[in-house]
Amino acid sequence: MRCKFCENKAYIKIHYPKMYLCVDHFIEYFERKVKRTIERYKLLKPTERILVVISGGKDSAVTAYILKKLGYNIECLYINLGIGEYSRKSEEYVKRQCELIDAPLHIVRVKEILGAGIGEVRTRRPTCSYCGLTKRYIFNKFAYDNGFNVIATGHNLDDEASFIFSNLMNWNTEYLAKQGPLLLGEGVFVKKVKPLYELTEREVVAYALAVGIEYLIEECPYARGATTIEYKEILNQMEEERPGTKINFVKGYLRKKSLFGQELEKAELHACEVCGMPAQREKCSFCRFWRLDEPINFKI
Ligand code: Q46
């Protein structure tokens, strides 16, 4: 097959809109789409200091690479979760990815600051649940303590579609009221953006290979059997039969999202007595879970 725009051999078939592209035209297509996403949802301003949360995987590496290429002022944060061999390997990849784009890298090690890695805590709470709580707290507090204006993450279209799908299946309307490519900052909560919001996982992999980004393919050991993987498979089957299913589903959700707004309960928040971050009780959920008596200062 030939590229739609030149005589070169096709590198990839884009399913929606259907077209074949050579490697150069695919890179151009991908980068244009990220730029359009940034403009359409007003994600970033040229002067903002951006903290890219990077994990060693393809999505965050591509996010950092492309934002840097588009001229944004980025620095990267890697949170080493202390998950054995998986964390050791991912840190190696992160270092290489940041060297490739010459971006400053900051590393926070969960084991060093909290005394145990993810998966080593005796708790009834599912591992991914307290891992998510820990990561969200660390990257927000790190960004806040160091004066970053924005946090960028690598969520792609497949992540978003499966997340919305799974929350609909469970009628988690509170979550459905709050998702999207842009979460505005408020007080100590730093603005969060998802520049790959309209790009599929398959396109992200193809872009990483095309520009020479090396990334960790291995999944976190706790990801096995996660329901989001099942939802992704179902959505992939639907996309196969009806190209455009995922993007139409996500765009439809964004149009109707306000319907879930009334489900948002305005909980009364006050400052956590340990770290000062917003809390519903005396301590915020992070300080409570990790039994902290002293705040963690992430200032560089
Ligand atoms: S939440 Fe769960 Fe992930 Fe944390 S424990 Fe691993 S799979 S890393 S996105």
Image: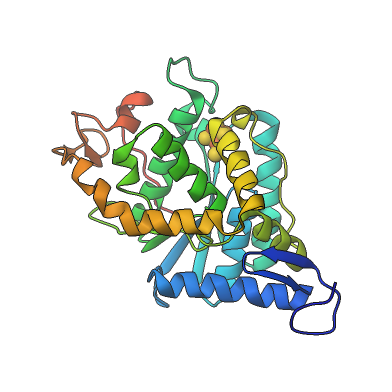
Q: Quadrant of the N terminus?
A: bottom right
User: Looking at the rendering, which quadrant does residue 262 occupy?
Assistant: top left
Residue found 56% across the figure and 76% down from its top: 70
Q: Give the residue at the far bottom of this rendering.
A: 6
Does 100 sit left or right of 40 as displayed?
Answer: right
Can residue 108 be seen in this snapshot?
yes
Name the spot of residue 214 as percent of width and height, x first.
74, 55
Name the spot of residue 116 as percent of width and height, x first.
51, 25
Q: Establish if 296 lies above or below 209.
A: above
User: Looking at the rendering, which quadrant does residue 171 occupy?
Assistant: top left
Can residue 81 be seen in this snapshot?
no
Name the spot of residue 182 as percent of width and height, x first.
37, 60
Towards the viewer: 254 or 273: 254
Towards the viewer: 121 or 15: 15
Name the spot of residue 272 as percent of width and height, x first.
22, 35
Towards the viewer: 200 or 245: 245
Q: Quadrant of the C terminus?
A: bottom left
Residue found 42% across the figure and 68% down from its top: 49
